[in-house]
Image: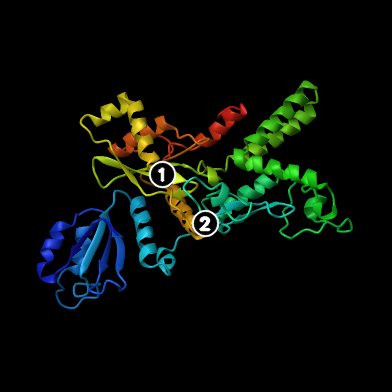
């Protein structure tokens, strides 16, 4: 149900037009038969749109007019395009449970998937997530009883499938995990493939390695994905330093060249790309209430219902800067009260990721996204972001204010330079 509902009487249409705001909103028009199919849409000016749809018609026109068919008007004001898109998604999903996907036309986010159920794990690029187990995704997160049905791990979202495939290929070039998609039945008589010939695969297909050796290589790939490449950077830098200490300068030079290749592969990752159960944070968006901002809590790539944070107090901008701890507490309390949506199908999870990806990869976007590092939000940055969004200011540098923050955190964790 949307926030407001008012009866439409054609002879008293001026009352309706005066009651609705001349601002952005998601709205729904119902006929006399409330069980019938409603008209659902979003608009940047609700009053103007309703005057066009429900106003009197002068002469013949091809424009859609529902004046004689509508009995009830429902709407919710929105403060940003992201909020409108998310509310429209929820409304269409509720009103058209069997056809909302065709109306939305969401493009699912490309992900890199680690297939771990296979005896010889591999990585692939996909836009689909395996079904859920344990009754869906619960508010506590993705791990445990509310996770995916298989042991697969997903990393994303990427902007395009091409970007995901390029990163996956460049990353796998650094390891010797298999690229083939077949179910392997190791046979010493099997001739192998081009990757085993080029020494780019441990070749489990013809017992070129033990199961333990292959499992260790898979673990290195997982660490590479989870750390944004810093695990391999640390490993190669240590080997390079050991070679230099041993005066083996040729080996040190070769390792330095390999190190540059690793850094080039890791540099392809935007800050939002990470293991999905680590995709936690908060998005700050303008609110329809001019004295507030809207906070969207992100839990495991799922978008929670927005919560309003009132910051428009007297001299509020000064207080926001002079008392950051007070604002941090208010933000933390507001987010603590938000419950993550309990998704029952993997499709819903993919839809949330699609909405998040569509906003994040826009060239020009409103609002800011702050992602958690090791479960902790960068609260000082969030406070500054709240101030900027409330004032309508653009952030300096990257639009998200967090580009690279996750990987800088991983670099600090690994004892590496943050640059």
Q: Quadrant of residue 106?
A: bottom left
Q: Is residue 248 above or below residue 28?
A: above
Q: Could you say whether the residue bearing mark 2 is in a helix, strand or loop?
A: loop
Q: Is residue 418 above or below residue 166?
A: above
Residue 216 percent coordinates (x, y): 75, 42
Residue shown at 67%/39% (left/top)? 261
**Which quadrant is the C terminus positioned in?**
top right
Q: Which mark is residue 51?
A: none
In front of the other: 230 or 328: 328
Q: Nearer the viewer, mark 1 or mark 2?
A: 2
Establish if 111 lies above or below 280.
Answer: below
Looking at the rendered structure, which numbered label has been put on residue 135?
2
Give the mark nearer the N terminus: 1 vs 2: 2
Q: Position of residue 64 (x, y in %)?
A: 25, 72
Position of residue 235 measured from the top left corner of the image (x, y, whole percent): 70, 32
Residue at 35% from the left image edge and 45% from the top image edge: 366
Q: Which residue is mark 1?
A: 297
Q: Position of residue 402 (x, y in %)?
A: 46, 37
The reply to whether residue 44 is in sight is no
Quadrant of residue 57 within the rendered picture: bottom left
Query: Is 334 left, or right, of 351 in this rendering?
Result: left
Q: Nearer the viewer, residue 328 or 391?
A: 328
Q: Residues within 10 Å of mark 1 (few under 14, many from 20)?
A: many
């Amino acid at each position: 149900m949307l926030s407001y509902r008012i009866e439409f009487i054609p002879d008293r249409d001026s009352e309706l037009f005066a009651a609705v705001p001349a601002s952005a909103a998601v709205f729904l028009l119902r006929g006399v038969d409330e069980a019938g199919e409603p008209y659902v849409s979003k608009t940047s000016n609700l009053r103007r749109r309703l005057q066009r749809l429900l106003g009197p018609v002068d002469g013949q026109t091809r424009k859609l007019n529902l004046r004689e068919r509508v009995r009830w008007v429902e709407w919710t004001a929105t403060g940003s395009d992201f909020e409108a898109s998310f509310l429209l998604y929820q409304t269409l999903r509720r009103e058209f449970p069997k056809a909302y996907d065709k109306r939305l036309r969401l493009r699912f986010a490309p992900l890199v998937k680690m297939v771990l159920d296979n005896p010889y794990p591999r990585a692939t690029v996909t836009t689909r997530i395996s079904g859920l187990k344990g009754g869906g995704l619960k508010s506590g997160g993705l791990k445990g009883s509310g996770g995916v049905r298989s042991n697969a791990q997903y990393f994303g979202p990427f902007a395009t499938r091409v970007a995901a495939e390029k990163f996956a290929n460049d990353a796998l070039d650094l390891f010797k995990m298999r690229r083939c998609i077949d179910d392997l039945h190791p046979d010493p008589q099997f001739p192998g493939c081009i990757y085993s010939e080029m020494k780019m695969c441990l070749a489990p297909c013809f017992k070129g390695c033990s199961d333990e050796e292959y499992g260790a290589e898979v673990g290195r790939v997982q660490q590479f994905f989870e750390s944004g490449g810093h695990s391999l950077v640390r490993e190669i830098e240590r080997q390079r330093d050991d070679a230099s200490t041993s005066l083996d300068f040729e080996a040190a030079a070769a390792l330095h060249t390999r190190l540059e290749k690793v850094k080039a592969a890791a540099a392809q990752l935007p800050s939002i790309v990470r293991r999905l159960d680590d995709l936690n944070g908060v998005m700050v968006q303008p609110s329809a209430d001019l004295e507030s901002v809207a906070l969207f809590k992100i839990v495991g790539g799922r978008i929670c219902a927005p919560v309003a944070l009132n910051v428009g107090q007297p001299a509020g901008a000064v207080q926001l800067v002079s008392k950051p701890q007070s604002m941090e507490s208010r933000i933390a309390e507001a987010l603590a009260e938000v419950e993550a949506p309990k998704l029952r199908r993997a499709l819903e999870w993919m839809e949330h990721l699609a909405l998040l990806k569509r906003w994040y990869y826009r060239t020009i976007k409103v609002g800011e996204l702050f992602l958690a590092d090791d479960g902790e939000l960068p609260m000082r940055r969030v406070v500054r972001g709240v101030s900027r969004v409330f004032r309508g200011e653009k952030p300096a540098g990257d639009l998200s204010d967090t580009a690279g923050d996750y990987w800088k955190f991983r670099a600090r964790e690994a004892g590496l330079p943050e640059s």
